[in-house]
Image (cartoon, rainbow, N blue to C red):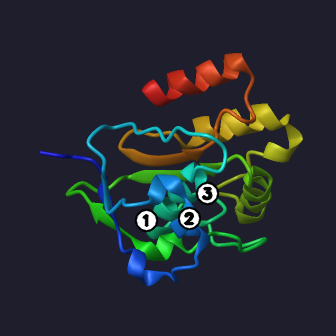
Amino acid sequence: MNNQFIQGVMFDWDKIDDDSYLKKIEAFKGIERLEFNNSITLFVGENGSGKSTLLEAIAIAHGFNPEGGTKNYFFSTHDTHSELCDVIRISRGYRKEKWGYFLRAESFYNVATQEEEYADIEHPSARYHEKSHGESFLELAQNNLRANGLYLFDEPEAALSPQRQLTLLMEIYR
């Protein structure tokens, strides 16, 4: 039995106009369903092939903020997400994640800023802006990786040196 938090994604392409750029992305042509059977799934492909667009849509459809963060992050600095989140329907598993995080390289600065604004006495800020981009990016990932969680990472390697990329891989494995 599949025990993944997200078992699959179904696509209803009739929910968007025929002239939508999403219908022109080669990787999406003819796709009706994606199934997730493993605890880690990687989307790999060339720039512009739809990886980030798909990951963003899955995150939004699952309840995450389009710019990243936990499901408790509600902010928008510039609304640019695609309509793919309206096309997909998530097939959820019987298990519910205990924690989750949508980590995006391109909007990390905005999330770090919002983290400071959300801080209070019980939840102090990690002050990500006071560290280098790579240090703060890795620390944010480390602070949010927990057992029984769902993590959607979009280009997590972008901010990290080769050594820190390996550190992140070890954290994910752990």
Where disc 1 sits, the SS reads loop
Q: Nearer the viewer, residue 75 or 10?
A: 10
Q: Amino acid at mark 1?
A: His
Q: Position of residue 24 (x, y in %)?
A: 56, 64
> Is residue 10 rendered to the left or right of residue 3?
right
Q: Position of residue 97 (x, y in %)?
A: 35, 53
Q: Amino acid at mark 3?
A: Gly
Q: Tags 2 and 3 in contact by the CB under 8 Å rule?
A: no
> Is residue 65 rendered to the left or right of residue 32?
right
- Whichever of callouts 1 and 2 sits on the residue coming sooner in the sequence is 2
Q: Quickly name the residue at label 1.
A: 62
Q: Position of residue 44 (x, y in %)?
A: 52, 38
Q: Nearer the viewer, mark 2 or mark 3?
A: 2
Q: Quickly name the residue at label 3.
A: 69
Quadrant of res 159: top right
- Whichever of callouts 3 and 1 sits on the residue coming sooner in the sequence is 1
Q: Quickly name the residue at label 2.
A: 24
Res 174 visible: no
**In this rendering, is residue 142 above or below 81?**
above
Residue drawn at the location 45% of the way across and 40% of the way down = 146
Q: Callout 2: 10 Å neighbours few (<14), some, many (20+)?
A: few
Q: Nearer the viewer, residue 56 or 109?
A: 56
Where disc 2 sits, the SS reads helix
Q: Callout 3: 10 Å neighbours few (<14), some, many (20+)?
A: many
Q: Amino acid at mark 2?
A: Lys
Q: Nearer the viewer, mark 3 or mark 1?
A: 1
- Whichever of callouts 2 and 3 sits on the residue coming sooner in the sequence is 2
Residue drawn at the location 51% of the way across and 55% of the way down = 26
Q: Callout 1: 10 Å neighbours few (<14), some, many (20+)?
A: some
Quadrant for the C terminus in the image: top left
Where disc 3 sits, the SS reads loop
Q: CA distance from mark 3 to mark 1?
A: 13 Å
